[in-house]
Image: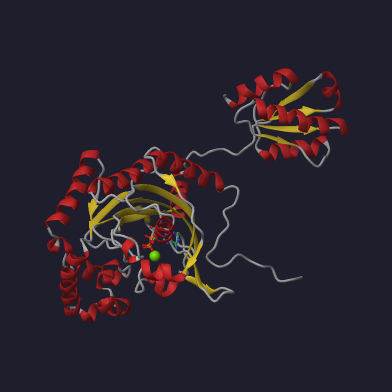
Amino acid sequence: MAKKIQAVRGMHDILPDETPLWQFLEDTVRRVFQSYAYREIRMPILEMTELFKRSIGEITDIVEKEMYSFVDHNGDSLTLRPEGTAGCVRACMENGLLHNQIQRLWYQGPMFRHERPQKGRYRQFQQIGLEAYGMSGPDIDLEVILVTARLWRELGIPGLELQINTLGMPDERKAYRARLVGYFQAHQDQLDEDSRRRLNSNPLRILDSKNPEMMELVSAAPSLMDDLGEESRAHFSAITEGLDAAGIDYVINTCLVRGLDYYSRTVFEWVTDLLGAQGTVCAGGRYDGLVQQLGGRPTPAVGFAMGVDRLVAVLETLGQAQVSTVPHAYLVLAGEKARQAGLVLAEGLRSEVPGLRLQCNCGGGSFKSQFKRADRSGAAVALILGDDELENQQVGVKWLRQDREQASVNHNELAEFLKEMTGE
Ligand code: ATP
Ligand code: MG
């Protein structure tokens, strides 16, 4: 026998038993985003490699070692997108959506990173992202955070912690950077290999270290708050005041820097303790420099990305009520004539009964085997159409999960009967 082909490591199937939870999340996201007038944008999954090098930054985990890049038949270096913001900015620039305009956008889709697979960390994973362009004030930062807070409420996810921080503007960061390098240099012996490498290239990223042995050193590091100018300070406090006014709890985490280089001022994350080490379910912030960095005019921008796989895992642990895909009724069809007439009858019922989930028996089979399938489908009732019933314009109704007597219903009363059952 030929060797079985398996899925690529770190890339998992989402099976039919799991998709209802995904759909519940996706439907809720769409509804919540729409209620703030954000519009969906869809970008290609492949982009020029250069796009990510120029946006995410060369000295980041993603660009250094996590990208799926290859040279295509034209000799172009292409990359499976590791995140959505760069592609979204590229698409907006290319289609003239940014100049003198305000945009509220969102997207969803698979992202690819060659990381070590573990619970909540995959090589193909799903993100839903939201981006707002053309607004520089703290009000839009606040709105973006409010969107996420509402989303958790609508999804029924309690207990997420909002962490926020400010990274200031580039010149403020420069002063801070010097102080930070001084601090870490004074503690060279406590730096791990990654951090030592970053000390000169990208010292702020040391604050993002996931190494538990670095925690103490990192948490005692100098804070950027002290290097902030008047405007950055005001921007940040307008957000925290807004959160206070909206009744949203948060923690200021001065070590929060994010794994991408393009952020300025506001950064935030939503963290859960339900998933173990992979606790960040949503991360974002302001990235005013990115559009210009990619060759556009200076354009203020703020946004976030959610890890959908992780959010679904949270919903799973909460045993959340979800959209059911179980059929309401299973149509048992006995006899040649009934087989065809049944499918036509079912068509009429689906048109007449909103939301009806009706499964028809296809592929024949004895009564016994059809009832077995009906039972396995999870349906509440089996509707039985044989040659006799067909002649009398009736169907038999057999309750599969309740102790109720079998009955007959006329074809012209069947829609009413099913409407009652589906609660419409
Ligand atoms: P982490 O610190 O967990 O590596 P990150 O800083 O690399 O996250 P972002 O690039 O900000 O993550 O992506 C936003 C969100 O996407 C994350 O908060 C997380 O929920 C999710 N995410 C990122 N990488 C993965 C992955 N490999 N598998 C599953 N979800 C992921
Ligand atoms: Mg990462």
Closer-to-camera residue (10/228): 228
Q: Is residue 183 above or below residue 265?
A: below
Query: From this viewpoint, is residue 99 visible?
Result: yes
> Residue 413: x, y in percent?
70, 18
Asked which colour scheme the image uses, the reply is secondary structure
Q: Residue at x 23, y 68 (%)?
A: 218
Residue 70 in picture, x, y percent from top left: 53, 74
Residue 138 location (% of width, % of height): 23, 48
Tell me: residue 206, above or below residue 378: below
Between 33 and 273, which is closer to the camera in this rendering? 33
Q: Name above or below for residue 17 compared with residue 55.
A: above
Q: Relative to residue 43, is residue 409 drawn left or right?
A: right
Quarter occupied by residue 30: top left
| Residue 419 to residue 322: above or below | above
Query: Do we see residue 116 in this rendering?
Result: no
Choose top left, top right, bottom left or bottom right for residue 213.
Answer: bottom left
Q: Residue at x 51, y 39 (%)?
A: 322
